[in-house]
Amino acid sequence: MFLVKDTFPERKKTEERIKINFNLPHIESEEEITLRTPKEIAARVTALAITNFVAFDTIDTKTATDYLIEYNLWEYITPDEKEFISNPTEDKKFQETWKCECILVLLWALKIVNSLPFPNELCNLNDIPTEKYPVSGDRDPSNFINTIHTIRSKSEILDANDLYYRYDRACVDTRMNNREMTQIHPSIVYERHYALNWLINYMDQEWDDISCDT
């Protein structure tokens, strides 16, 4: 078991005993990546917030559809999300609930969330102040999307991406060796890795097609 230094600067807990593969290649450098724009991030997290409300039965299909039409948001909804909203089966809703971790990462990138907690428990989006959340009541979400957000630096986002890339690989290695990962939650790690890959334009993939290669 190796002692892994968590180089992510905002995390209170800086060391975890998680076995990782030190031969993993490095991720892209700052010169090699182009971050998503603040507006792209704000629009994506707004779309995720709406689908997440459907996933948790906060709103139904009709309410979500009416909301998207009223505020001209359909352009921000991906094909997979449109399919989910139109037919939110229980299995699909369960899968979509994990996207709250993606929401957390994107709000962190927009500096609305101060830090990403250690990935051992599902995040609670109710901890985010209503006035800072992209979707709430009758408030026009276009105001959130068009706000000039300040985003985190390339180095901060790449540090987080590198950390979750290695966490993800540790989860994969554990599963391949028929062992259980107990220190971190593989699904939380995967969703955060997914959002971070989108943020850095990994392989120029769009949201529905993001791959989390390890």
Image: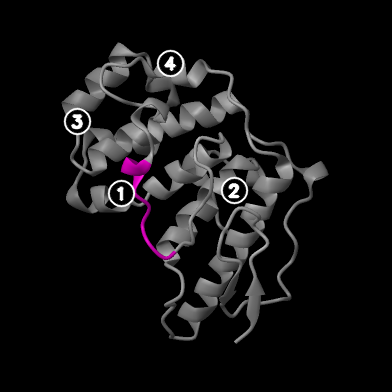
State how far apart marks 1 and 4 are (Cα).
Answer: 24 Å
Q: Earlier in the sequence, mark 4 or mark 3?
A: 3
Three-letter code, disc 4: Ser
Magenta run includes residue 173: no
Q: Which x, y percent locates residue 188?
A: 43, 59
| Residue 77 in view in this figure | no
Question: Residue at the front extreme?
Answer: 12
Q: In the displayed structure, would residue 94 be above or below residue 185?
A: above
Three-letter code, disc 1: Thr
Q: Which x, y percent locates residue 131?
A: 38, 25
User: What are the residue bounds of the magenta stretch?
Assistant: 120-127
| Residue designated by label 1 | 97
Residue 190 is left or right of residue 99, and the answer is right
Q: Earlier in the sequence, mark 2 or mark 3?
A: 3
Three-letter code, disc 2: Asn
| Front residue of this view, candidates 14 and 89 | 14
What is the crowding at mark 4: few (fewer than 14 residues within 10 Å), some, or many (at least 20)? Answer: some
| Residue designated by label 3 | 61
Q: Earlier in the sequence, mark 1 or mark 3?
A: 3
Return the mark for residue 142: 4
Q: Earlier in the sequence, mark 1 or mark 2?
A: 1
What is the crowding at mark 1: few (fewer than 14 residues within 10 Å), some, or many (at least 20)? Answer: some
Foreground: disc 1 or disc 3: 1
Q: Which x, y percent locates residue 147?
A: 53, 18
Circle 2 — which element?
helix
Foreground: disc 4 or disc 3: 4
| Residue designated by label 2 | 197
Three-letter code, disc 3: Thr
State how far apart marks 1 and 2 are (Cα).
Answer: 19 Å
